[in-house]
Amino acid sequence: MSTEREPASGSTDSTDVTDVLFRPKSIVLVGASGDPAKIGGKLLAHLRDGGYPGEIHLVSKAGLPIRGLPSVTSVAELPVDATIDLAVVATPAAAVPETVAALGHRGVRAAVVVSSGFGETGTLEGARLEEELRAACRTTGIRVLGPNCQGVANLGAGLVASFSSTFSKSTGLTDGGVAVLSQSGAMAAVLTQLAQPFVDGVRYWAATGNELDLGVADLLRGVVADPAIRTVQLYLEHLGSAPVLAAAAAEAARSGKTVLALKSGTTASGSRAAGSHTGALAQEDSVVDAFLARHGVVRARDPREMSELVRLFAQPRTAGEGRVALVTNSGGLGVLLTDEAEAHGLRLAEFSPRTLAELRAGLPSFAAVENPIDVTAQLLSTPELVRTALDAVEQDEGTDVVVVALGILGEYYDLDQILADVVDLQRRTAKLVVVCWVAGHAGMVERFAAHGVPAFDDTTACMRAIGALARHGRRLAEEDHVPLGRPTDAPDGTGLQSEHRGKQILAGWGLPVVDSRLATDVDGAVAVAGEIGYPVVLKLSGPTIAHKTELGLVQVGITDDDALRVAARRMLDAAAPGGSVSGAVDGLLVEPMVAGVAEMTVGVVHDAAVGPVVMVGAGGVQAELLKDVRLLVPPVTEAATRSAIESLALHPLIDGYRGRPPGDVEALVRLVVDLAGTTAVREGRVAELDLNPVLVLPRGQGVVAVDVALTLREPDR
């Protein structure tokens, strides 16, 4: 994952630069052309044809009038009394830095640089030009979108400062409650085209290119401030400035908007220290998932899924508790949707006696009414059966979502009547109404969407999208109770700590660590064991000692003094000059034997872009093999932590599986939440932390970390 990019330090703050980009009062197009085949020609055509109401100034090579507008040959020749908000630059790359500097000196507040030939080329010349452009931004204060971008649009203001084919007349794109912000011009077009048949329109559109200065995260904050926007689609190849993205996502959540993200690409952030369980398990894509989830961003896995999600999230209704009523004409289709509902965290509604009575009275005697409701093939001759079923479930208090799932409905059916009945329900009820139209008359999905009813042609897509909407609602409710944090002292020093020192630090944070006592010689170890009581565990502790088990530097189940002396001498001999252990050692750790219900791992990694990430999952020597872990980005709530633990494959083992004693899951939840809230974690002092294993004791007895590997870093400045 990329590190946070360095801003160009322009004078126009990113909180108001979106106003300049999306609502400029005047524009200068540098590189204008009358040739519609050229980029400068397409830009001018889109500005004029899109109905931009402000002043348009042109800079062209010839300096001749273009499409009835005067042009000049350089920025210096622009009218001295003209106030220009936004520049769109479409010149060869070599001329861009000088052009942008001239624009900045003239007082232009922002520039969209569509020119290519910069860092994206991978050449030294491209990198040099990009650095020169960055210097021009710093020197003049102008803010830059791009280079190598496809521009911006605000259909609500008649602005199309882009050459993308998205805005050709044939697409028929209209203004609406959706925004598309993308680091790729092509993907911005793809997301727009896939969403267009199913939403009321797209207002804001931006393709940010190389993000030398402004990026998707900067634009998001301004876009969600518009009351007309309900949903923002993001395409990300890197997170860019993660703190800015997190702040913008928080503003979106506060204002009732949803941010959807399609994230692609890989970086080197998944490469961690080979000896770290946490580093090996917390891979790049999982960190992205945790970051997006923590900040209320719903992730799509591919463009098609994004188009499915936006159909539901662009409308104002929620999925409530996810209780679904299915109305279908096919028993088989009902079974398929029931399976998909369960697979995506939904459940079928349990109808009230009143609802069941109405269904039995209104449907044929051979119809199924228990949910799924099967109106049967009688629908062919009695199209009002759908309305009868919908009238019954509309008043059912145990139903949150009504899914009308119809298969193989062609010309023999009264499609207009069925459409009208579903649309009528959608208009009069507060419940979420969704259509799943499978293999029937072509064009019906789009017809329902045109009337404001979310519609799908695939059972999996339908339930997957509803499940995502329901989970998002639950997550937002959980985030109302984010803990304020746990005050702790920040540890001294940096680098890998010895196990002894690591346990001291964690105990100082108030976290449950095994009673671990240090002895410097054999007699001291025996004395400590006498205080603790046999059986005991013996370990050699030192900041450079890793893989203790493989080196024979851990011995468990020691039951008497003689066995302890033998083990202690062997370990101390290994640490002596010429022994198998190099580096300084603290001494010998003597600890009690502890038996738990299960072994877990809890850890922290510091991601270069995201910051601290907390992990919880299956522990022990098989942790990396099983990779049964979940990641959380602080601050974390008890509800989110509990949900993460319950989603683990091994959760049944710590919850009383087949008569096993149930473990203290609540204590494990508290450990994760308390660790995430410590000062050192929140301030980025923890580079990596492995607590493996953490023993989960029987319910009511807590948890205890028996092995600790801690690496500290300098705090972020």
Image: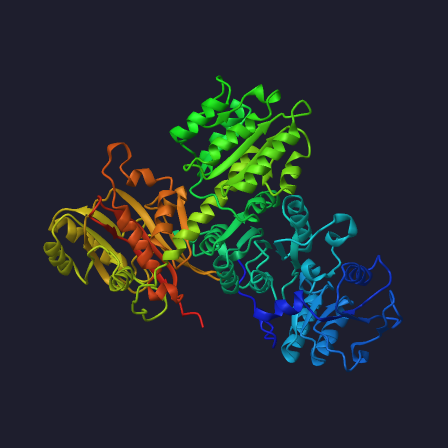
- Residue 488 in the figure: left or right of residue 337: left
Q: Nearer the viewer, residue 384 or 565?
A: 384
Image height of 327 relative to 176, above or below? above
Residue 479 coordinates in the image, percent (x, y) = 40, 55
* Count of marks overlaid on the render: 0
Q: Nearer the viewer, residue 350 or 362?
A: 362
Q: Nearer the viewer, residue 109 or 404?
A: 404
Q: Identify the residue at horizontal 57%, vertical 20% (top origin).
A: 377
Residue 271 coordinates in the image, percent (x, y) = 48, 55
Q: Nearer the viewer, residue 443 or 573?
A: 443
Residue 355 coordinates in the image, percent (x, y) = 43, 30
Q: Identify the residue at horizontal 47%, vertical 26% (top origin).
A: 359
The residue at the far bottom in this view is 80
Asked which quadrant contains residue 416, the reply is top right
Residue 468 coordinates in the image, percent (x, y) = 49, 44
* Quarter of the rendering occupied by the C terminus: bottom left
Q: Is residue 498 visible?
A: yes
- Residue 58 in the figure: left or right of residue 529: right
Q: Identify the residue at horizontal 55%, vertical 40% (top origin).
A: 426
Image height of 326 relative to 175, above or below? above
Asked which quadrant contains residue 180, the reply is bottom right
Q: Is residue 275 visible?
A: no
